Image: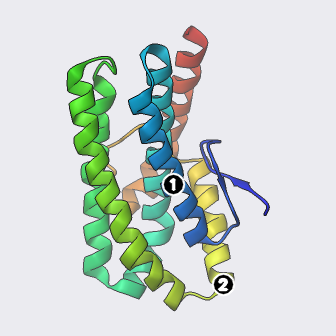
Amino acid sequence: MTGTTTGTGTGTAPQEDVVDVLLAQHQRIRDLFADVRAAQGEHKQQAFDELRALLAVHETGEELVVRPAAERAAGKGEAKARNEEEAEANRALLELEKLDVASPEFDAELTAFQQAVEAHAQYEETEEFPALRASCDAGQRRAMGRRLLAAERIAPTHPHPGTAGKPALQWTVGPFASLLDRAKDAFAHHRD
């Protein structure tokens, strides 16, 4: 199996089929939640930073590439509900980002956030992804996978609740937010 690197450089996808890429990312997100829980100190912060970045680019990619196809396959209401969940997750992630990872408050908030992310992923995996497989042929899913990975390479790496769940804003504001986020990440990395 060949691997395709995700937008954050974390994890690999078994192929470019959009559903397979997203399933691999969901597993990586689950693994990162476990890593954050198991780590302490600087390692916990690093694991959380990786989780935060992957979630930010993953949700942006889903909103820009997957939701339009999911809307056609599963209906507007379902796509809107997933976008609303992602907007709420974005707000929760922003609040987590403000907390000290060593604090009990962080752990409590992380638990609630993880449950919401798991429920969201479960719904996608049991409802949205099967609808995509049924409504899009393999070539369409591979093309979507390539677009998803391209969108993730330029997606913001920090939560931006004002654009979450709003694909039009993601397309217009996202590249600028991404530039700032990636500069912020680079400076934070070099400061340490």
In the picture as drawn, the residue positioned furthest to the right comes out as 2
Asked whether the viewer can see residue 162, the reply is: no
User: Which disc, if any, is residue 27?
Assistant: 1
Measured from the top left, where is residue 40 in percent x and y? 42, 18
Measured from the top left, where is residue 86 in percent x and y? 32, 56
Closer-to-camera residue (81/150)? 81
Tell me: 45 left or right of 145. Answer: left
Q: Residue at x 22, y 35 (%)?
A: 109
Residue 183: name its quadrant. top right
User: Where does the N terminus fall, quadrant-wise?
Assistant: bottom right
According to the picture, the residue beneath numbered tag 2 turns out to be 138
Q: Amino acid at mark 2?
A: Ala
> Which numbered mark, 1 or 2, is in the foreground of this view?
1
Q: Residue at x 57, y 18 (%)?
A: 189
Mark 2 residue element: helix
Q: Amino acid at mark 1?
A: Gln
Measured from the top left, where is residue 186 in percent x and y? 59, 23
Closer-to-camera residue (147/170)? 147
Give the CA distance from mark 1 to mark 2.
22 Å
Asked whether the viewer can see residue 184, the reply is: yes
